Image (tube, rainbow, N blue to C red):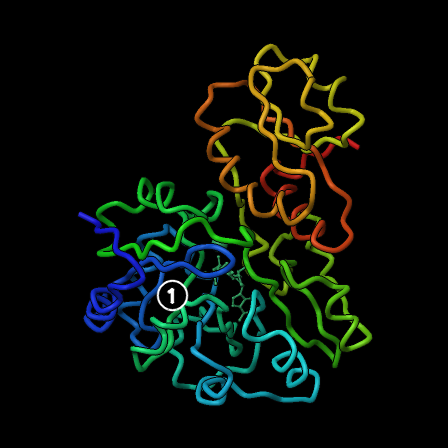
Amino acid sequence: MTKIISGNDLNFAKDSLDNGNIIIFPTETVYGLGANALDKEAVSKIFLAKGRPNNNPLIVHLKDKNEIDKYAIINNEIEKILIDKFMPGPFTLILEKKDIIPDNVTCNMNTVGIRIPDHVIAHNLLSIINYPIAAPSANISGKPSGTRVNDIYSEFNNKVDFIIDGGETIIGLESTVVKVIDGIPTILRPGFITREDIESVIGNCKVSEYVMKEAHGNAESPGMLYKHYAPITPCILVDSKKILEESLKYSKCILIGSSKNKNIPCLKYFNYGDSKPEIAHNIFRILREADKIKGDIILIEAVDTSGLGLAIMNRLIRTCSYNYIK
Ligand code: TXA
Ligand code: MG
């Protein structure tokens, strides 16, 4: 049986990690499913518990910036500036890996994703162990990322020793994944740290073309190849002004959107919030709740892709298997 423990009982989690087992811990973005990143066997348990394809690499979580040198090589000034400005925080930097990181963490890539969570429980946990934690988001592969202990418990009961309860995660979407390619910071997965944030410190930032479209074996980040964030009920992303017209086509329509659309007749309406940070915070929880209602379609209101909107739309377009009515 999986035990839920508080942030004051981290020694249980430490013992479990020391023994090569996996645990679930909170971060500011989403919960992580963690193992000792230097223990190959422990890392392989992550892939098994999540049903994760073995060519999708894991992020390595560190206690602070001084640790980066032990596990990765910083090759240029731009990487230094990004570390300086955005770590700790909801930001993952892809760096050249050192040999100490086992090959199954990076799925044989010569780079490693490094992240320093800005969360007191994650930080305290990383401070009482003497190795980094490899962790993907805590969800069964293909499902929305885990942002609440109840949701995570129902997916991982009996698969992990401990879940550390940190309440609902604040940001609600996973970190921004950035790689410096030909001297230019390139967003492989958008997140709370936006393109505009990076441009304001570096002056230039690219967004991978696969952020808003489907990749077929050609993406810089393997995570973009997979079906993601998807309820069982089919979902369609719809521009706000087309929602009424679309909703009339279904007898059991579930609607997820802002308060603008709250009066549209449907089986069930979920208010995802009226600002982008609220939408980011709520969306994965609502997708799980919407899937418990037996509707024949879930219509989700689209947002514009400026700022945090890009991260929201990157997740929603995958939730909707690229079905987007504009
Ligand atoms: O906020 C987060 O990033 C959360 C928390 C737990 O830290 N973690 C998370 O991990 O979202 P995961 O495994 O669900 O997503 C990691 C993403 C994947 O899209 C993966 O392909 C990409 O990062 N990635 C990891 N290592 C990479 C590498 N060396 N090169 C390119 N992409 C990489
Ligand atoms: Mg994930």
Whether residue 286 is situated above or below residue 244 in the rendered picture: below
Residue 323, how many percent across, how many down? 68, 34
* Above-or-below relation of 24 to 96: above
The residue nearer to you, when weighing 20 against 193, is: 193
Left or right position of 48 against 233: left
| Of the pair 229 and 151, the residue shown nearer to us | 151
Quadrant location of the C terminus in the rendered image:
top right
State the residue at coordinates (31%, 64%): 44
Q: Is residue 14 left or right of residue 306?
A: left
Q: Nearer the viewer, residue 99 or 129?
A: 129
Q: Amino acid at mark 1?
A: Ile
Q: Kindly indicate the quadrant of the structure image that contains residue 13.
A: bottom left
Mark 1 neighbour class, 10 Å CA radius: few under 14, some 14 to 19, many 20 or more: many
Q: Residue at coordinates 69% horizontally, 55% vertically from top-left?
A: 210
Residue 293 lies, with reference to residue 148, above or below; the image says above
**Residue identified by numbered label 1:** 121
- In what element is the residue under mark 1? helix
Quarter of the image where one finds residue 219: bottom right
In percent of width and height, residue 93 lies at: 58, 74
40 relative to 187 in the view: left or right: left
Q: Residue at x 68, y 54 (%)?
A: 211
Question: Where 262 sits versus 124, above or below?
Answer: above
Image x and y of residue 156, in percent: 30, 47
Q: Residue 21's x, y, as percent?
A: 23, 64
